Amino acid sequence: MGGINRIVAALQCQRRLPLAAIRLHDNVCNTASLSTRYFSSSIAINPSLQYNIRMPASSKSIRCLSSSTTNSSPSDAGMAAYEIRRAIETNKSNQYKISMATHLSHAGLSRSNNNNSSNIKSFNSPLSPSIDLATTYERPPSGHYGEDGMIYSRSCNPTRKLLEDTIGQLEMTSSSTKDQQLVASTFAFSSGMAAVSSLLLACKSQVKLLMPIDVYHGLSTQLKCLNDHGIVHKSVDMTNITKIRQQIKEYIASGDDGCIVVWLETPSNPLCQVTDIKEVCNLVHEMDKSQHGEGRIMTVVDSTWAPPCVTQPLHLGADAVLHSGTKYLGGHSDVLLGVVSCSPLTENGEWLAERIKAVQVSIGAVASPLECWLTLRGLRTLHLRVQRQCDTAMQLAQYLNGHKNVKKCHYPGLKSHPQHAIAKQQMLGNKFGGMLSFEVESESMAMAVAGAVNVIRRATSLGGTETLIEHRKSIEPEGSTCPAGLLRLSIGLEAPADLQHDLEIALEVASSI
Ligand SMILES: Cc1ncc(COP(=O)(O)O)c(C=O)c1O
């Protein structure tokens, strides 16, 4: 088969490509003659569907097309088909939406270095990103680094940038056309808590934080640390919109031109409470708009328990979303990292992005290149890991919910969960997360269950491949509202039957003591 016929065959193989009139535009060839010479006899013309394919005049494929139909080589055909496919993909009306799973499988995979060049090297890119460890970069003789120039790795590092861009894209990937191209400005930090403090520092002073009663205890501990810096905070039941409105009103009434930050964590730690993100964001936007003066009111979601393939808070109206990448994003209990993504859809999100960028560079709690690389690698399997973790969590929640020695099981996937309907709507693909907690009669019984597990490991943290159990009350600081008989499970990738068997024996042993 000659080169041109190969191209035609390649085009016809594109199931999505209707048989179409193909017009080639270039500086060398006559458009009309190319069109009729090479394509009109082979491809039926549908005048309503035309692809305008722009090819660089220097392109090898164009030379092949314009010079001959008979002498072109198979490689020329490959190059030409490649160019045509690229042109099809850049045609806005022909945008096929790549799913989250595909984005994740290709995390950190670059297509960008083969821009319009036929040079072999430019197509010969590695399929795993490299780790850039350099802290400093040579300054050009002109003295100008240029806008994208690398200077010093605290201000910019290619591996970190790759992770930030990848996560920024994931947070915005959606099934709707509108937001497909948008990327959330994202910043990677040396831990989840570094991300939290950098975000708070980026807000306009004075910060008034409204946080959930049931929340990761690290936030309360950090606020104690930051007390001297004037951050005011109050806790509220984040499942009660009336109470949230009332608290925001009180903050507004107390005056001042700072920032009111409504901090959501959903599902919450450790009680798995679910907040209706959309409802809270709508309220916050409405109150922010009606607010006079220089103050801002914004919503930030700590979505550590619900990674982007489970919940996308920016699509629900949040101004920023935060993850401890130490958990699901890294996914193997070997990375310490945090990320904040700011919404390109809200004015407050864009405002925050500018300020967080400055804090990241000047305060300097940046993620290291190795941690960024490990997180990128973790992202490639995120969807598979999380799907399995959610399925197993559902199975174990159902088992524990009916167990005679279990007082209560907290899991948003259970129909009996008070916010199950919200979870079903807000959490993607019927996935309710890989975290659950359950209560037994007493603290001693909880300790005994944790002591009797064999497959499951006793440890803090979450989101890894190994299932972890933790007695939360004894690890949380004084004043914790966590029930004394509560055990938290982070579900891993083990066979569900092995985990169920492990819990069954552990509950039996604990009840015999
Ligand atoms: C919900 C949540 N947010 C933030 C953090 C803090 O993350 P890191 O330990 O990476 O600092 C954690 C840690 O457990 C967490 O569970």
Image (tube, helix red, strand yellow):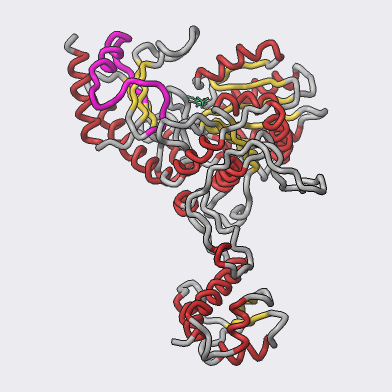
User: Residues in magenta?
Assistant: 437-464
Question: Residue 419, how many percent across, how many down?
Answer: 44, 31
The residue closer to the viewer here, 222 or 316, is: 222
132 vs 274, left or right, is right
The residue closer to the viewer here, 390 or 117, is: 117
Can residue 275 be seen here? no
Can residue 52 be seen here? yes
Question: Residue 203, how many percent across, how many down?
Answer: 71, 27
Q: Quadrant of residue 120?
A: bottom right
Residue 176 included in the magenta stretch of the image: no
Q: Residue at x 69, y 10 (%)?
A: 228
Q: Is residue 407 above or below residue 367?
A: above
The residue closer to the viewer here, 331 or 238, is: 331
Question: Residue 1, how many percent across, how many down?
Answer: 43, 87
478 vs 55, left or right, is left
Q: Residue at x 70, y 22 (%)?
A: 249
Residue 442 included in the magenta stretch of the image: yes
Q: Quadrant of residue 29?
A: bottom right
Number of marks present in the image shown: 0
Question: Residue 157, how many percent across, how many down?
Answer: 63, 40
Q: Quadrant of the C terminus?
A: top left
Q: Residue at x 56, y 24 (%)?
A: 193
Q: Residue at x 52, y 81 (%)?
A: 19
Q: Is residue 94 above or below residue 420?
A: below
